[in-house]
Image: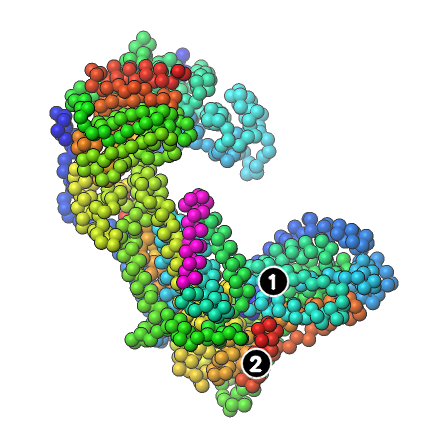
Amino acid sequence: MGLMSTGPARASRRSVAVVAAAVASAALLSACGAEKISASGSTTDGAGSTDTSASGASDKWAVQLRDGSTFHLAPSIAKRVEANEPVGYLFSYQSSAIQGFSEQFKAGFERTQPEAKQIYPGMQFTALAPSVNPGDVQQQISQIQAQVNAGKVDCLSLNPLTGDGYTQITNELLARGIPVFTVGITTQGNELTNFTQIPLKEGAQAATTVLQYMRDNNLDFKTFAMSAGDPTLSWAPQRAEGFQRAILEAIPDARFVTTPRSLLNVSYDAARSLDAYKAFFAGKGKDVQVLLNVDITAGYAAQALDQAGLKGRAFSVGWNVTPEQIQAIRDGTQIALFDQKWWQQGGFGGPACATFLKTGRVLPNTQRLEVVTKANVDSALADLDRILGKG
Amino acid sequence: MSDEVGVELRAVRKTYGDTVALQSLDITARAGEITGIAGPNGAGKSTMIKLLAGEERADGGEILVGGEPWSPLIGARGVAVVHQEPELFPNLTVAENLAIGRERSRWLRRGMSEQDRRLLDDLAILPLADRQLGGLPLAVQQRTEIARALAQDARVFLFDEPNSALTEEESDDLFRRMHELADAGRTVLLVSHRLTELCEHTDRVSVLLDGRCSGTVSGADLVPETIARMLVAGFLESDRAVRSPVSGEEPTVLRLEGLGDGAGAFAGVDLEVRAGAIVAFAGVEGSGARELVRAIAGFGRTSGSLEVHRSGDARRDQAFVPASRADSLFTNMSVGQNSVIRLDREITGPGLALRRRRSREIARSLSKRFMVKAESIDAPIRSLSGGNQQKVAIAAAIAAQPAVLVLEEPTRGVDIGAKREIYELLRDYAGEGHAVVLYSTEIPEVFEAAHALHVVGGGRMAPPLLVADYPDVESLAAAATELERYAASPA
Amino acid sequence: MTQTADTNVVAGGPVDPLPPTAAALRRLRMAGTTFLRVGGLALAVVIIAGVFSIHTDGQMLASDNLLGIARSVSTIAILSFGLLFVIVAGEIDLSFANLYGLCTNVIAVLWLLHGVPVYVAILAAFAVATVVGSFNAFFTAVVGVPSFIATLGSSTLIFGFTLLIGDTQTFSAQFPPAGHAVSTSQLEVFTNLSRFNLPFDFPMQGLWTIVLLIGFGFLLGRSLFGFRLKAIGGNREAARLARLPVRRYVFVAFIISAWMACLAGLLDFAYVGSASPNDGQTYLFPVFAAVIIGGASLSGGRGTVIGTFTGALLLAVLNNGFALEAAGPFAQQMLLGVVTIAAVVLDRFTNREGARR
């Protein structure tokens, strides 16, 4: 599922609702939570409530933040790091109950632990997530709060459900001297790094892949369509937008049967999306040559167009690694899939925290969308199985 | 005492579909007096209360309150009904119950007005003002209802069986408050079954029979015997069943030995009922009579033994018809479906498939035998009059052919014609070699339908009164009352 | 009726005082309520199909697409048949959607991960469903927890179990997890549950639905069970006092619902070949909508299998039309809302027609 994706969540109505919920939770936080944080800060370091009090000793960790202020590591953490004492790393992600996504996040979290331990031997790892699909803003924030209050968090990697709901807690923790990285979605706050994909760019990259495929196979696509599991999530129309723009630039007379604002809604249910694709290819989509699913169910689009007898004339393109899409790529009904490398997002925080605490260096966002085509499908699959420990 | 008329009903008429609840009711209640209303079940008392309170509109006639024609405003503000079960908000506090609906602003105000405080103090419930109403005794809830009525300056107070669930002390207090209300010039109406109380506390009593006022007594005539006679007036001696006592040779159908109730409502009941007998149990609410009858029907946890021997063509042990039709009928079903709902093998073929034609035949013959007035057996049950609905409920139980047919107040809210038909059906069913057990609150019902009456008081069952031994209803009623007093007193 | 002298004082008289035509008319009207309902819905289906058909140049009514609708109606139809029994019994079941997912995951984990024969895995899934149904019924009918709350709780509990056993993995029967093999004969049998080649390419799931439609139609409309279940749903207290087997029937209703959830999950799994923990969750609303649109009363005692099927068909046609047309998500949600409310309004209207008072 693509829920995890990236980018600002401004336009979507859902995020408006979540913001409302977040404002409520923020109010709650400011009433009791914030107090707790400072209280716990004072028990651990006695000076945690002031961010300007950092001594010269912690200059190594000074970072210029987005809003122009400077981050200083909390003296208590700095003291422990200098004494090579154990530090606590918390990875908080949006949900432990989303198919594929949660599995990869957990695998990534575990996979990079040895690497992080090599950098910072005494690091202790905790991963927490609400067990509801697709997530729960308030619950996730409470989980972080509880860990922080228990004094277990010296560095946080945060994968928010939506960006805006987490801005306040991110900035607060940073102000208390706790480093925060985000993965997947940015909070628009002061986080040191947002390790992620950018939906518009992802869409453009999808277009590049399709155009390359046209050149390689001497094809002349004119009719395109785009679908999503839930068109109301902000990144879905953004990926579609990026794709459409890049295609229109290269093929000015290209026709889009669905637009970023009217994406075909196929749901995340396997059977339902297969039905939806079949109907679509019988109806408005009967002339479509390339169907881009900005989500996880493109494999069913491939099956549907195969059953509709469109194989060789129409192709699917999709996101994330699923057995159905892999099979479709092998069969030649799907051009490519784009692997967001969820496990990389899950695994980023460990080494990033270890590196920062040890050296003060902030790891940059280096995430790349991996394009999986017929050429590299076998190696890509083997890689993923290895990551998930199934190899 | 003034001669000012508080409430006057003139030729008031009200029908529910085919059922005539009030034929032409004329009643006058004076301000400053307590007027009693007596009448058997179904005489139209509750309809009269509903009309005065504005819950229903009359079909004809005139209702005057304080000389003015009744209007919704008068009904809502000027007439207060104090119910058997107070109709208030159990989830709110006493003070909130007093204030609700009279708020002077949109904002909830903390605390009570001085006026409300004084009212509660007068009724001696001020200390309970902040308690949730639902958790308080009935008497307090009734006082809250009175307070509420006083707060809106009601002129007419209607007490509907107000003390049926109160202790003696509580009901004495309630009567004291009624007198206070009357002394303050308000009009008080008291609807009650308890004749002694009516005579003791009211200035005059009007008797309702069959939807009209059959007479009013006051002064020296105001004694229980007079009212009792008026209540059973029109009851023809010929109505009573030919009651050859059930012979000792009939097989025993029901045998109770040391039957007791798990919750202690009754204990140590021994009884033997033979085929062909109709046995009635009577007792006020809380006496254990209702619980005993339900236990005989097979409900509730009991100790001791209860044996049913199927005689004749009985196919099931017991069948029970509860008093309230809300608990005996299925409003989502038709007349026919309601009458065969208790059957199983009778209406099924192989594989539990319903034999529709057969079940319709059964339903139709039941409908005919019980003289159910319905357009057809496919008519919705709600389209029938109360009496016919009750006949369907009883028909459904009889259709199950129980060895013991158990009924709770079988003719509650049923017009007199239907009553007689129902009694006859019960006698027929007993005559076919079954036992019939009744829980009844009406002595005329017992007199007309039953062979024997067991009075229950304080959880103990008195020895039977054989109805055939009594020449008339009055003497039976007198004997029953005496037994009740005896049974209720500690041994 | 022999004892008294004046029996006939009262106008007891014969049963049907009305002329036979009036009675017949009434009967017609009674039967008409159901007929009107199903007929009205069928008409709505035809109108919606017609509108979409015009919009899509006849594609809606192309035989391939009709066969597609026949398949896609099955999931909602089967789930709503199960829910219908619970609703007729006067209860609510919120757990079927997550049970659908639990069943697909039980089958997937046992079969694909642990190598248990698929037949055994399916039996195990139905055993799990029986446990869940009994659990719901126990808390509802024996402990006395309102079924809304009991099944809300069990729904969450079920989802927890799904996550526990499946570890949020997605399973595919055609592409089993690395290092695991699936017997081709078992795979074929499994796939044939939903993809068996029927004449005219009629979808296998459509056939399942028709069989269940007839079977349940008989059970609810023509059997003692259905007759009594309606009574129990219509008036629980009266049913208890009339000694109907209330508890047993509530158990059966919840177990039927659980089995149908499991069957729908199984058939969809066989159809698409993949199972994941979030399976079924999106069916909660449409299935309730189908049952309500189909004329069942949420207060119990009323509902027909054919009506429910027509409700499911309406939703399937709508979904199909939206996919054909690729209308935006907003139109889809809004129309679904309109249809649901319209159905309930229609229900109140026909209901008032049926009852005189």
Identify the disc placed on residue C140. Answer: none
Quadrant of the drawing holding the N terminus of chain B: top left
The residue indicated by pointer 2 is A372
Please report the residue visible at 29 percent of the width from the left and 15 percent of the height from the top.
Answer: B478
Q: How many marks?
A: 2
Q: Name the chain letter of the residue that bears numbered label 2.
A: A
In the picture as drawn, the residue positioned furthest to the top comes out as: B220
Mark 1 lies on a secondary structure that is: loop
Q: Position of residue A183 (x, y in %)?
A: 66, 68
Picture quadrant where residue B223 is located: top left
Give the residue pinned by disc 1.
A94
**Residue at 42% in and 80% down:** A306
Crowd rating for badge 2 (residues with CA inside 10 Å; few <14, some 14–19, many 20+):
many
**Segment colored magenta:** C123-146
- Tell me if residue C49 comes above or below residue C287 in the rendering: below
Is C128 a magenta residue?
yes
Return the residue nearer the eye: C67 or A203. Answer: C67
Q: Which chain's residue wears label 1?
A: A
Amino acid on which disc 2 is placed: Val
